Each structure stands twice: as structure tokens, then as C-alpha cells.
Amino acid sequence: MKFFDNSIGYNMPMGIGFISLNGLVVTNAIILLDKINRNRDAGMKPYDTVIDGGKTRMVAQVVTALTTIFGLLPTAFQDPFWAGLSWTVIWGTIVATVLTLYCIPALYYEAYLHEGHKPKPRKRNLVQSFFGLLLSL
């Protein structure tokens, strides 16, 4: 983790990297929430809307994150001036992608439940519970 390496201090390109991450994070969250709301308007159950929205948008967000990371790796290792920006965007993209894919749907579902909507308990067999547990990891 280059942030904790003493050879790179805070510099102006690193600040630019933080600013550019805001656009990436907000755009990913807005697109994910839009998909969840469209599923909800189509009449899907709240839990299913969140799961379907996450599954549908996961591939696009992970591919976008990977292209950003692999595109900045040469700059991170070769150019000392732009290394701060590169490492900021690389680590910020990793953290933001994980948080967007896991925290945003969970917070949306919790907010939906706190509006007064309580889901009916669903009966699950052992296989469904096992695969649900694997998907949640």
C-alpha cells in the first residue's frame, strides 16, 4: 500500500485523484440505485430488487474498476510525479467498488424496512440457505 510508504507524501496530483474518485463513486451509486428503483417500480419484491440490481450492475462496475486499475498501473510504477494520483485512484477504486456493491444495496434495503415495510418471512430449504450464505460473502 503506497499510501503508508514514506516515499510518497501528499501532493497536488493526489488531491486531483481524490476529486476524480468522487465522480466515479457517485456515478456508480446513482446507476445502481436507479436499477433498484426501476425494479421496484416494476413490482418486484424489495429483497429481490436489491439482489437483482446488485447482480445486474456488478459486472459493469467490476469491469470499469479493473480497466481503471490496470490503466493506471504503468503510471504508478514509472512516473514518480503522477504516482500519488495513480495510487489514490487505484486504492480508492477498489474500496469504492466494494462499498458500492455491498453497502449501498444493504443501506437501501434497511431504509426501505424503516419506512414501515416489513417483509414476510420466506421459507427456505437447506440448499437455498447455503447458496444464499455463499453469495453474501
Image (cartoon, helix red, strand yellow):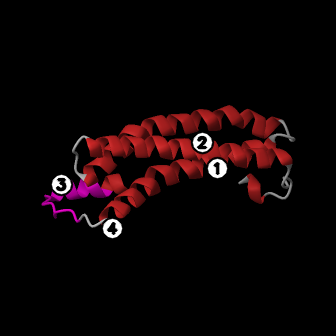
Residue at which label 1 appears: 92
Sequence order check: which comes first, mark 3 or mark 1? 1
Specify the amino acid type for callout 3: Val
Q: Give, as a single range, the part of the protein colored magenta.
A: 118-133
Sequence order check: which comes first, mark 3 or mark 4? 4
Q: CA distance from mark 3 to mark 4?
A: 30 Å
Residue at the image position 74 percent from the left and 42 percent from the top: 86
Sequence order check: which comes first, mark 2 or mark 1? 2
Front: mark 4 or 1: 4
Sequence order check: which comes first, mark 4 or mark 2? 2
Q: CA distance from mark 4 to mark 1?
A: 30 Å
Q: CA distance from mark 2 to mark 3?
A: 37 Å
> Residue 65 lies in what quarter of the image?
top right
Instruction: Determine which of the numbered discs, if any, sits on residue 4 in the image.
Output: none
Between 78 and 120, the one lying in front of the other is: 120
Q: CA distance from mark 3 to mark 1?
A: 36 Å
Residue at which label 4 appears: 114
Residue at the image position 33 percent from the left and 52 percent from the top: 135
